[in-house]
Amino acid sequence: MASGGSNRLMSPVELAEYLSVPKQSIYERWRIWGLKPIKVGKHLRFRERDIENWLEANRVSY
């Protein structure tokens, strides 16, 4: 699979804005969605390229 996006780390708030979902959705569903965060101290961060790959893998075809 091609790796899109960058190595930039996004906070849950930035990810929520990027996905246009409430911040609480990120905290409640990242495990269910299969997202793999990186812990920086006690904080979760999400690599932009991992999010891009996840979005591509979950694309709905009509």
Image: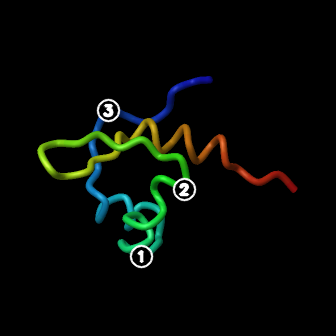
SS at mark 1 in the image: loop
Q: How far apart are marks 3 and 2 (CA)?
A: 23 Å
For residue 33, above or below residue 38? below
Query: Colour scheme used in the picture?
Result: rainbow
Q: In the figure, is residue 46 to the left or right of 58? A: left
Nearer the observer, disc 1 or disc 2?
Answer: 2
Q: Do the residues labelled 1 and 3 touch (CB within 8 Å)?
A: no
For residue 14, above or below residue 46? below
Comes first in the chain, label 1 or label 3: 3
For residue 15, above or below residue 9? below
Residue type indicated by callout 3: Asn
Q: In the figure, is residue 1 to the left or right of 59? A: left
Q: How far apart are marks 1 and 3 (CA)?
A: 23 Å
Q: Residue under circle 2?
A: 32
Quarter of the figure with residue 46: top left
Q: Residue under circle 1?
A: 22
Q: Where is residue 42 in the image (x, y as percent from the top left)?
A: 15, 51
Residue in the image at 29% along x and 65% along y: 13
> Residue 4 has which mark?
none
Local crowd at mark 1 within 10 Å, few (<14), some, or many (≥20)?
Answer: few
Q: Residue under circle 3?
A: 7
SS at mark 3 in the image: loop
Local crowd at mark 3 within 10 Å, few (<14), some, or many (≥20)?
Answer: few
Q: Position of residue 2 (x, y in %)?
A: 58, 24
Residue type indicated by callout 2: Ile
Residue sitting nearer the eye, 26 or 6: 26
